[in-house]
Amino acid sequence: MLSCVTVAMLCLLFGCLILTGHSSGSKLKAPVINIKGKELVIQAGQPIHLTCRGNQTVFWKFPAASRTESERFHISDNLCQGNPKTACYRNLTLHKAQLNDTGFYSCQYEYFTSSRKPSGIYIFITDGHSAFIDMHNREPKIISISKGERLVIPCRVTSPNIMVTLREIYGRVLSVPGDKNIVWDNKKGFIIRKPTQPFFGLLSCEAKVNGVTHTTAYFTHRESTEIRKVWLDVPNSIRLLRNSNLAINCTVTTDLNSRAEIQWTYPGMQFGRLASIIKRIVLSDSEAAVYSMLFIHKVRSIDQGLYICTAKNGPSTKTVNTTLRVHAAPYINVKPRKTGVLEAEVGQKLYHIAVKVRAFPPPEITWWKNNLLAADKCARYIINNSVLTIKDVAEEDVGEYMVSLKLKQWNLIKNVTMTLTVNVKPQIYEKSMSIQEPQSYMLGSRQTLSCTVYGVPPPKITWTWRPCKRYHFGSRCDFHSDSSVPLIVGKNSSSMGNKIYSITERTRLIEGKNKTAGLLVVDDSQVSGIYTCAATNKLGMERRDIHFYVTDVPSGFHISIDRVAKEGENMTLTCSVNKYLYKNISWILRRRVGNRTINHSISKQRSAITTEYSTILTAVIQNATQADSGTYECRATNTFTGDVMSQSKDIAIKGEPCSRKIHFSRTSKQRRKNCTTESSVTQ
């Protein structure tokens, strides 16, 4: 069997209640105060006597201001009767009541607070001439709320019957009768359920007591929980040398009516490493900025890692971070991004010469070309730390480029040299000269054809041949169906080609460039066609077609007369042209009449005859007379240029009067006598 003392101790430990005369299911009654009603008015200076009775030990709660003056108030010990204790009471005595003793006085059980609500009474302390318990005249009391909270203006009064008005300082009245959003409670003050903008700022509570107006002021504002921005004044990654100082500034901006808190987390915290943190606040017209600078003196390896700045504003939180790496000593590692000889192309818009750099601290970087500062050497060079960019690449950009990296403080230098070659597409200089008209080459002659080429790398020169079809009647150079034929020394290039005497090359320095002349020597010119020289390198190919027209006519254009005719004799004029170079061949007679030159067509022209190499046109003058004297001109159109070419002969036929036959000239239609003549021809 358990003793009574043991049972009592167990009840205290587990909160059990044993009441004599009550069933196990009965409930504990609330404590009772000796004064009935919910509120009481007492004159200032009078005492307050309160007694609380309950079925267990009780304790008192009352305004905190009264507790600071222990000589004015007294609370007795619990006095209980019965075994177990079922009837207890406790007294509260407050001497000389003051205005700030106004408030709620409540009594409740010590160990069973959850079983019943506390019993209490609200006591007003009045002095007959004061309206408010708390007066704020010189400096308004600040009241802050968060978004969504109700606003309470705590202008508590000294008497329940005092009428209070809430207004803007020196402004309109806010406590309008019938406004359900604002409620007056003489124990708490004004309660604004959903505060709007007019309820924030400088407000005042006003009341009259015995004809005197009393005013107490408040400054209300709604705290914003928004965090606008958070940032660090350093990049996402920081590198420092050992024993250097670290300083990181974290900035947080918020609305003017809020203040953010900043907290730092850093690697050294786990090792007890203390950092100096300096904070300050700067207000502008539109926002509040909070600055927090973290400072660590002489960083060590334990300081490496993640640094986190956390900004808090009520429930809002934002973080930013950076990573610190600590290097034991300065260093430079550098190498070209491309190995071997660098290659660019003439005309390339941009070419980058770059190196990979790993160095700390950041070194001083200088670029050189052929031992001269690159930036001074050419305005087309753009330097951006580890990259040199060449704009509009030219041949003069060839050379050695050196990048020099220096850490002067530590006398640390690293150099890297790279060679740049500028490639040039093949060029054939004969093509860049004035227009090269096709030429004719004498039948059976030895001819030398040339192509002067330049390029980087040096182009390879090849020669090919396309012969014209050999037939007597055609005046066009039609090619065989097969493609170009490569040329071989000592052999005909095809069954209808010319024998090649030699194919050689020689290189010379011309205008500062090594140019190569490709020479093709044709041994026996027999067949017309096109020789093509092609210059090829890695950038492409350039071609030059050389029209090789074999002619049996000197210079490809020639006129002749068979005899010097006398008056009454016949005369034949012959015009021969290379059939591939000329067309539209014709004879005309030019005669001067006074100060004018008149052209006459010759009616007795025969049709042009085409041979293997030439086109031949003849004109026959029968029974020549003095009227047939003049300048005989052969004209032909250059097939390629469209220019009209001509050669002419001056022919003068002289004679004496004769009484024999009379005939008509084919040109002048005037009567002439047949006589013995002398003729002369000038060309």
Image: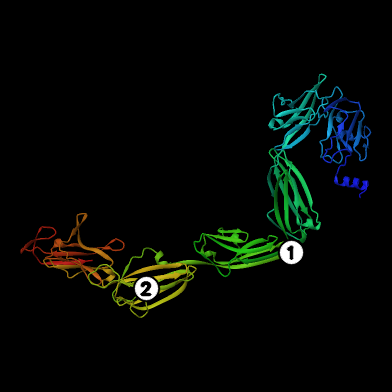
Q: Looking at the image, do the residues carrying marks 2 and 1 touch, with CB atoms under 8 Å apart?
A: no
Q: Can you tell which quarter of the image residue 61 is in?
A: top right
Label count reads: 2
Picture disc at residue 329: 1
Vertical placement of residue 482 versus 273, above or below: below
Image location (x, y in percent) of residue 643: 29, 61
Q: CA distance from mark 2 to mark 1?
A: 67 Å
Q: Quadrant of the C terminus?
A: bottom left
Residue named by callout 2: 464
Look at the numbered disc 2 and give the secondary structure of its residue: strand
Which mark is in front, 2 or 1?
A: 1
Residue type of the residue flagged with mark 1 = Ala
- SS at circle 1: loop
Res 42 → quadrant: top right
Q: Is residue 478 left or right of residue 290?
A: left
Q: Is residue 634 visible?
A: no
Mark 1 Cα within 10 Å, few/some/many (few <14, many 20+)? Answer: few
Q: Residues within 10 Å of mark 2 (few under 14, many from 20)?
A: some
Tell me which amino acid carries mark 2: Thr
Direction from residue 453 to residue 437 in the image, left or right: left
Q: In the figure, residue 467 lies in which quadrant? A: bottom left
Residue lying farthest to the top in this orientation: 211
Residue 298 rendering spot, x and y as whole percentages: 78, 58
- Measured as percent of width and height from the top left, residue 596 is found at 21, 54
Residue 647 position in % (x across, y down): 25, 64
Q: Is residue 326 left or right of residue 125?
A: left
